Amino acid sequence: MQLSLKKYVLELKHTFSISRESHDYQDTLVVALGLNGQTGYGESTSNPYYKITVESMTEEINAIRSEIESYDFDRPEAFHQFLTDKNLSNFAICALDLAAWDLFGKLKGKPLYELWGTSNENYPITNYTIGIAPIDKMVAKMKEMPWPIYKIKLGTDNDVAIVEELRKHTDAIFRIDANCAWSAEETIANAPLLKDLGVEFLEQPLRADDWDGMKKVHESSVLPVIADESCIVEEDVEKCGRYFNGINIKLTKCSGLTPALRMIKKAKEMGLKVMVGCMTESTVGISAIAQMLPQLDYVDMDGSLLLKKDIANGIGIKEGGKLVFPQLGGSGVTLK
């Protein structure tokens, strides 16, 4: 296979803030794998929380470049196992795994959702994320992007008041993501107030390792709670099933589509709701997520909508969340 790596610096439309960080730009690594006249594309973004940079991923991949380029590619699952055996980080494996699946589908001439035996006739609508900001700016972002579902980032001293104010300006469904900023007591107290304000569920309100707190929340919260930072890899699904109502899978964190498919299967066997989220990827990464939509209950794939300028063509997200699926096989990605 031919391998190429390219760093992009994605400029955001607005400063994006969550409970622990803010940024105006997102560094991302795009991987291209070429074989038999077809090229597959994958992506992983940098992440300070997990101490991942584009440079660190590039160094990892280049260290085994010759082995990747001489690899006899047949199935993405086998390629993923090959990469796992090389002890690459999950973020680096993800970029390569997404590229491998895109390549595989293009070689087969079919979109991945079809190769996986699903139909794209019905799919969940992505939420649109409103990051932490002064309330007037949060309202302005909603008015700039009228949407049926908003994910509201919280983790301030007046979280319920923020939601009360936002509710005055829209009838949309709200989802709340506190990014580990609340205590168990705060979560249990906030839940009924937020439920009355039209909130659908809470995402990762507590620290990722606060299992005692999550036990209390699981027993007492009137709103469903979805695991994010507590659910990183496949092995986390079973434990999260005892403390959460659902899981949010991030491709970069779990190492790509290959393990994500297994996580979805396991979660459904346990009766959990399944969501896939994004990490402010471009359309390269978002198009991979889109292939999983028929298998999901919820999705957060608005990364490309948050950018001033996208770098790729693929899944098209129209006003109100309607999707235009690409005609190409695989994830359907081409670079601009």
Image (spheres, helix red, strand yellow):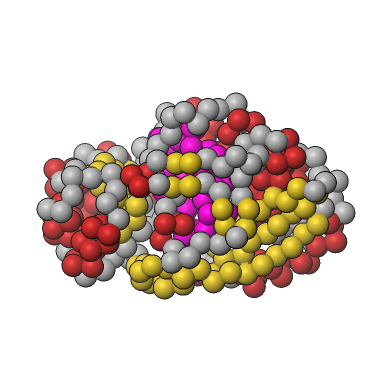
Q: Nearer the viewer, residue 308 or 239?
A: 308
Asked if the magenta segment contains residue 302, the reply would be no
Task: Give the left or right position of residue 260, taking residue 158 as reference.
Answer: right
Asked if the magenta segment contains residue 281, the reply would be yes
Q: Establish if 262 lies above or below 279.
A: above
Task: Give the left or right position of residue 280, taking residue 200 as reference.
Answer: right
Q: Residue at x 20, y 61 (%)?
A: 139
Task: Give the left or right position of residue 327, taking residue 38 as reference.
Answer: left
User: Residue 65 is drawn in which quadrant?
Assistant: bottom right
For the C terminus, the quadrant is bottom right
Viewer can see residue 97: no
Q: Establish if 203 lies above or below 138.
A: above
Task: Give the left or right position of residue 316, taking residue 145 as reference.
Answer: right
Residue 201 image position (x, y, % from top left): 29, 43
Q: Which residues are magenta?
A: 273-300
Q: Nearer the viewer, residue 219 or 170?
A: 170
Q: Residue at x 71, y 46 (%)?
A: 103
Q: Residue at x 44, y 41 (%)?
A: 323
Q: Nearer the viewer, residue 213 or 9?
A: 9
Viewer can see residue 25: yes
Residue 205 image position (x, y, % from top left): 31, 53
Residue 197 image position (x, y, % from top left): 15, 46
Residue 273 image position (x, y, % from top left): 40, 35
